[in-house]
Image (tube, rainbow, N blue to C red):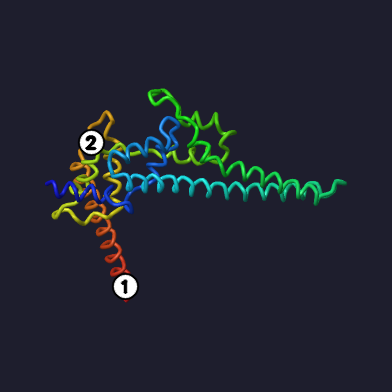
């Protein structure tokens, strides 16, 4: 049993390749925790070198996301710049001067934005005991201070997290598919597992075994109906051929 448990742990968390570093980034984007909390937890789990390696990888993941959003903002700003230039073509103004000034502003903003991640990580954390802190609200109120990083936080923190327990996640697939029921399509299996999770806290108790039985009944009825329709078409064609002959 211990070996099986270790195998399941290694499958999802033991190897760096299998780990979803976006989960760590979500913790870093919490102003109460930031990178300091992630580094602290890694220090409890691994040796110093491994903890430093994972911490740097989490930071690199955040920086990569930030640079991706920064490039998108630059493209949007360039498109706006082209529209502004086209709008003032008929005005007696030195367009070249305005264009150079616009590029200068973009370069200044770019230099300032490049330090957003470092500035956010260097600044102190909010009170870790503040359970009432609205994280998305905090980023909204600091959007002018962190123009690009706030957009990263807005999209990352808006991703809903499943409430499925770890043991349930490991064993649900085995309960749905077994040696006697292995013909369900992947889409059907995914629908059954997701529906069970979504309805887990509902007022109506959910029995996945009964759901599977109901689904098989509906599939059998559908296949029987299709067979009857097919036979009816065959008999109709044979009758038409007999009458024509």
| Residue drawn 29% across the image and 73% down it | 242
Q: Position of residue 78 (x, y in %)?
A: 67, 50
Q: State which tag comes first along the sequence, 1 or 2.
A: 2
Which residue is located at x 17 percent, y 46 percent?
5
Q: Which residue is mark 1?
A: 241
96 to the left or right of 212: right
- Give me the residue at 67% from left, 46% from top: 106
- Label 1 packing within 10 angstroms: few (<14), some (14-19), many (20+): few
The residue depicted at 50 percent of the width and 32 percent of the height is 123
Q: SS class of the residue under badge 2? A: loop
Q: Nearer the viewer, residue 189 or 118?
A: 118
Give the residue at the far front of this rendering: 48
Outermost residue on the bottom side: it is: 245
Residues at circles 1 and 2 in contact by the CB criterion of under 8 Å: no
Q: Please state which of residues 210 and 244 is positioned toward the viewer in this rendering.
A: 210
Mark 2 crowd level (few <14, some 14–19, many ≥20, 10 Å Cα):
some
Disc sitting over residue 206 in the figure: 2
Q: CA distance from mark 1 to mark 2?
A: 53 Å
Number of marks drawn: 2
């Amino acid at each position: 049993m211990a070996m099986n448990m270790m195998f399941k742990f290694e499958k999802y968390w033991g190897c760096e390749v299998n780990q979803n570093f976006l989960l760590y980034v979500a913790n870093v984007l919490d102003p109460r925790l930031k990178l300091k909390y992630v580094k602290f937890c890694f220090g409890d789990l691994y040796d110093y070198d491994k903890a430093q390696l994972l911490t740097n990888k989490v930071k690199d993941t955040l920086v990569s996301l930030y640079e991706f959003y920064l490039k998108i903002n630059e493209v949007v700003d360039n498109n706006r710049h082209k529209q502004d230039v086209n709008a003032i073509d008929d005005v007696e103004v030195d367009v070249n001067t305005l264009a150079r000034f616009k590029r200068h502003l973009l370069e200044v903003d770019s230099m300032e934005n490049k330090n957003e991640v470092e500035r956010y990580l260097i600044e102190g954390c909010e009170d870790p005991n503040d359970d009432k802190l609205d994280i998305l609200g905090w980023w909204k109120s600091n959007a002018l201070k962190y123009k690009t990083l706030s957009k990263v936080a807005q999209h990352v923190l808006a991703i809903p997290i499943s409430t499925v327990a770890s043991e349930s996640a490991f064993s649900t697939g085995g309960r749905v598919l077994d040696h006697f029921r292995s013909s369900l399509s992947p889409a059907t299996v995914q629908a059954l597992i997701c529906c069970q999770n979504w309805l887990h806290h509902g007022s109506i108790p959910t029995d996945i075994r009964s759901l599977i039985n109901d689904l098989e009944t509906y599939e059998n009825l559908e296949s029987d109906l299709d067979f009857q329709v097919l036979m009816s078409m065959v008999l109709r064609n044979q009758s038409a051929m007999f009458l024509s002959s």
